[in-house]
Image (cartoon, rainbow, N blue to C red):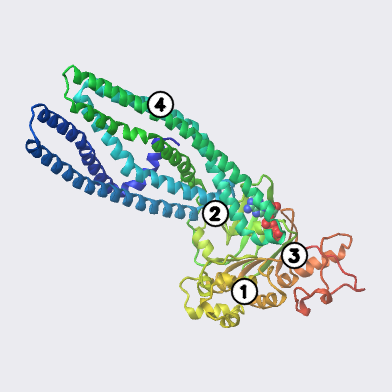
């Protein structure tokens, strides 16, 4: 990204505050004029005093000069104080407002992006967070400095240069010649540092990602006593970061010294030139101070040039990846406009293939299936068979590579995505609990639900009694609950949402036997008169399904009712499957009602069954 592109990107964010910009510009212009007063006053004072001394006049005559000079300088300082306050205040206001708008816009955007966006490498949580934080920080710092530092300094510089030319063409020329040399050196410095800054940016992103990873998996790290490995990984990143930062600073110091040298050469040339004109009688002695102060005003912003370059480079580098996040239009979740009167819940998948965006291997192959409305459909199969992926497609989180998914005869793509998801409930193996109370977390299922409705939902998931035993009841922090209790919150949310279609992706996998049985009862209740798709490795969860699809390697290899699949497996005892169908007496982990267990074949031989 170059500077022009950067300004084009920032423009819409600055536009609402253009009046602040206009005020800042007016103040800058006035400030640049008052900044030259010192040079005028010094020349006036030196020349006047010089005349008084040469003509032998004393303190009495000099008093009027001193009074005039003092009043002028104090008035200028008072005016300057207001100008600086205004510049800082409006500059800061602009920064804070734009920072808020950038932060809110990026949140709005990422919430609108499809899931695929978050699974690509640069958008993993830690990295994305750094991209956003650094982007906003560097952009707003640039905007703030532009109005507080850069603009006033450069305005001073231009006015001072104009005055130098006005005083003497050659003196002005020296001032002018220094600027391109300075620019040239600063440009080389910036070029040398650009690669390193990019490196620093990437290392910082990796570090954030690493820290986030440690925090997320602290229990695993501790249980495997792998603190050393994690420490080493972070140490390697930290050392690389430190080395690159040191190299960057070293380069900066070398160039800073060079630029300081160039500036001092400028000062020496100005002194020589002015003294020459004083000696040949073309200038008064006051011109020496006058020119040096003016040159100081010219070189002040140039002295800051490397810092300005640094900040611009930072802004260019960080804003590039920030605006990539902001402008990822192709990542916005697609939505059709179709909204039916009522969603029945009849899904039909026709020849669906699917590959995850960051995965080269196809996950689903030629899926053809039907999900009947008001019925329970189970997806079973080994881990990695593609069951959750199928649900992701039914929820429109991802689009198939080819083939079609129809809901009540209409392509999912044509559905208004918000409407579709209003009609679908999803319970995962591990559901996210937000930082908040139990009441707030359950109400996530329906923000308009009353307290009584929240309690009712909690009762249906057998959570209410446990909550009532807690000191703060429904106001207890939900993060303090056990995994099983948190899962009950997720199901309670579903009772509040009350959608006609429910996807249950191993809803009891993280629960103990009693909680599983309790939740099974609540799930049985919620299944009534809805379209339910359930994924489970537990027989008790799927035995009452109207239709079971068996998946393997991303394909559907068998389907039917529990009885038909059981009969089929019994007819083909030679088929080897990975897990035996548990007999009633051995089923301890998942209590299954005895009337629902398959009857072992005559002779009591443990039958290998196909769908686990
Ligand atoms: P389990 O019973 O363990 O949950 P599953 O049958 O639900 O397994 P999926 O989670 O659908 O299996 O995964 C199917 C395949 O897709 C796996 O090989 C997995 O590595 C891959 N996969 C799943 N999620 C992603 C993702 N976000 N990005 C890339 N590949 C993925």
The residue that appears at 21% across and 34% down in the rendered structure is 39
Q: Residue at x 57, y 56 (%)?
A: 397
Tell me the tag on residue 413. Answer: 2
Query: Is 234 above or below relative to 439?
Result: above
Position of the C terminus, as image quadrant, is bottom right
Identify the residue position indicated by label 3 in the image: 560
Which numbered disc, 2 or 1, marks the residue closer to the eye?
1
Where is residue 203, by image quadrant? top right
Q: Sequence order check: which comes first, mark 4 or mark 3?
A: 4
Question: Which mark is drawn over residue 485?
Answer: 1
- Label 3 near ligand 1 (CB < 8 Å): no
What residue is shown with label 4?
184
- Which element type, helix, strand or loop, lies under badge 3? strand
Among the two numbered marks 2 and 1 on one chain, the one whose residue lies closer to the N terminus: 2
Q: Position of residue 518 (x, y in %)?
A: 67, 78
Q: Is residue 295 visible?
A: yes
Image position of 76 (left or right of 89): left
Q: Nearer the viewer, residue 492 or 188?
A: 188
Dot 4 lies on which element?
Answer: helix
User: Is 138 on the left or on the right of 402, as rendered?
Assistant: left
């Amino acid at each position: 990204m170059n500077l022009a592109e950067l300004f084009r990107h920032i423009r819409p964010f600055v536009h609402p505050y253009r009046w602040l910009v206009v005020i800042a510009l007016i103040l800058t212009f006035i400030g640049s004029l008052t900044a030259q007063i010192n040079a005028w006053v010094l020349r006036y004072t030196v020349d006047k005093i010089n005349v008084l001394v040469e003509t032998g006049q004393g303190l009495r005559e000099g008093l009027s000069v001193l009074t005039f000079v003092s009043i002028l300088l104090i008035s200028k300082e008072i005016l300057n104080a207001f100008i600086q306050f205004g510049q800082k205040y409006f500059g800061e206001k602009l920064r804070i407002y734009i920072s808020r708008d950038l932060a809110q816009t990026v949140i709005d955007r990422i919430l609108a992006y499809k899931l695929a966006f978050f699974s690509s490498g640069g958008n993993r949580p830690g990295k994305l967070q750094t991209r956003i934080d650094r982007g906003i920080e560097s952009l707003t710092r640039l905007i703030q400095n532009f109005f507080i530092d850069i603009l006033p300094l450069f305005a001073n510089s231009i006015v001072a240069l104009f005055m130098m030319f006005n005083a003497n063409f050659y003196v002005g020329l020296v001032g002018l010649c220094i600027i391109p040399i300075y620019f040239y050196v600063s440009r080389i410095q910036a070029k040398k540092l650009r690669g390193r800054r990019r490196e620093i940016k990437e290392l910082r992103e990796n570090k954030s990602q690493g820290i986030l990873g440690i925090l997320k998996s602290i229990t695993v790290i501790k249980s495997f006593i792998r603190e050393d490995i994690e420490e080493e990984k972070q140490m390697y990143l930290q050392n690389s970061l430190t080395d690159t930062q040191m190299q960057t600073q070293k380069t900066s110091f070398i160039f800073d010294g060079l630029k300081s040298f160039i500036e001092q050469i400028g000062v020496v040339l100005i002194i020589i030139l002015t003294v020459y004109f004083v000696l040949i009688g073309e200038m008064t002695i006051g011109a020496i101070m006058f020119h040096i102060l003016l040159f100081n005003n010219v070189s002040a912003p140039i002295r800051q040039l490397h810092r300005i370059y640094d900040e611009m480079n930072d802004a260019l580098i960080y804003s590039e990846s920030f605006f990539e996040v902001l402008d990822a239009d192709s990542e916005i979740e697609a939505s059709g406009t179709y909204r039916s009167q009522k969603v029945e819940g009849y899904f039909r998948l026709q020849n669906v293939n699917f590959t995850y965006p960051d995965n080269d291997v196809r996950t689903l192959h030629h899926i053809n299936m039907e999900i009947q409305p008001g019925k329970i459909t189970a997806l079973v199969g080994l881990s990695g068979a593609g069951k959750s992926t199928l649900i992701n497609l039914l929820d429109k989180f991802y689009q198939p590579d080819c083939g079609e998914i129809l809901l009540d005869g209409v392509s999912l793509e044509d559905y208004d995505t918000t409407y579709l998801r209003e009609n679908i409930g999803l319970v995962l193996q591990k559901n996210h609990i937000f930082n908040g109370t139990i009441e707030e977390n359950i109400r996530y299922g329906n923000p308009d639900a009353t307290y009584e409705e929240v309690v009712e939902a909690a009762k249906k998931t057998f959570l209410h009694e446990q909550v009532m035993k807690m000191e703060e009841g429904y106001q207890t922090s939900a993060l303090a609950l056990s995994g099983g209790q948190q899962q009950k919150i997720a199901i309670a949310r579903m009772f509040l949402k009350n959608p006609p279609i429910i996807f249950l992706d191993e809803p009891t996998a993280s629960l103990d036997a009693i909680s599983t049985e309790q939740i099974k009862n609540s799930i049985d209740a919620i299944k009534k008169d809805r379209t339910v798709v359930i994924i489970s490795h537990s027989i008790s969860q799927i035995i009452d399904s109207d239709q079971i699809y068996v998946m393997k390697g991303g394909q559907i290899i068998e389907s039917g009712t529990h009885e038909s699949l059981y009969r089929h497996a019994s007819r083909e005892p030679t088929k080897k499957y990975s897990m035996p169908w548990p007999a009633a007496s051995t089923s301890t982990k998942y209590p299954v009602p005895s009337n629902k267990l398959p009857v072992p074949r005559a002779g009591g031989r443990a039958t290998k069954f196909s769908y686990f």
